[in-house]
Amino acid sequence: MKLLQPFAFIVLVLGTFSCTHTDLYEKTAVIPEHSWKSTFKPSFSFTIKDTSSPYMVYLIIRHNDRYSFNNIYVNLYAKGPGQDTAQVVPYDMRLGTDETGWLGSGMDDIYEHREPITPRSSEKAFYFRKPGDYTFTIEQLMRQDPLENVLNAGIRIEKK
């Protein structure tokens, strides 16, 4: 009987996690010396096979507590299969407020923010129109250059 209890627990855990989202892609780039120069534009390439499913695209930013602003302005460049030029999505990512502090999840003095990016205000997800290779590039647009105390920037793409 005691041998069956751990087995039942493992089956329950596996059953619970097998029904959750499976990430399609997540990657972050380390910002050199925690000082994000406007010329450093991390780029992320991935392959989309299923064009019938909606996808969520998240912008990921990690910074430490010494970051000087409540937001970060970025351009997200998206280039799909067969495209010669990338489409540009400007984004103002809210990181904190003076009243409540940092909005992301934190551990010690490091904070991570994962914000969904939608193609249009009326849509809640991306639909990739063509199967193939896509490249997303992130460019910081803040007035301070280099932008100090930013540790990582990246993207996450998952099926909705």
Image (cartoon, rainbow, N blue to C red):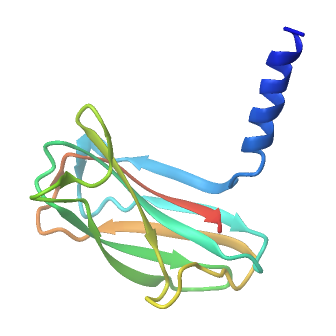
Q: Residue at x 18, y 68 (%)?
A: 142
Residue 42 image point, x, y percent: 42, 58
- Residue 39 in the figure: left or right of residue 21: left
Residue extending farthest front:
1
- Residue 143 in the figure: left or right of residue 119: left
Residue 6 vs residue 77, the one in the foreground: 6
Q: Residue at x 41, y 73 (%)?
A: 76
Residue 79 image point, x, y percent: 55, 78
State whether residue 84 is above or below residue 14.
below
Residue 83 occupies which quadrant of the picture? Answer: bottom right
The N terminus lies in which quarter of the figure? top right
Total labels: the figure holds 0
Residue 110 image point, x, y percent: 28, 39
Residue 149 vs residue 107, the one in the foreground: 107
- Residue 133 in the figure: left or right of residue 120: right
State whether residue 77 is above or below residue 147.
below
Residue 99 vs residue 76, the one in the foreground: 99
- Residue 1 in the figure: left or right of residue 91: right
Q: Residue at x 42, y 83 (%)?
A: 88
Residue 92 image point, x, y percent: 27, 74
The C terminus lies in which quarter of the figure? bottom right
Residue extending farthest top:
2
Residue 128 occupies which quadrant of the picture? Answer: bottom right
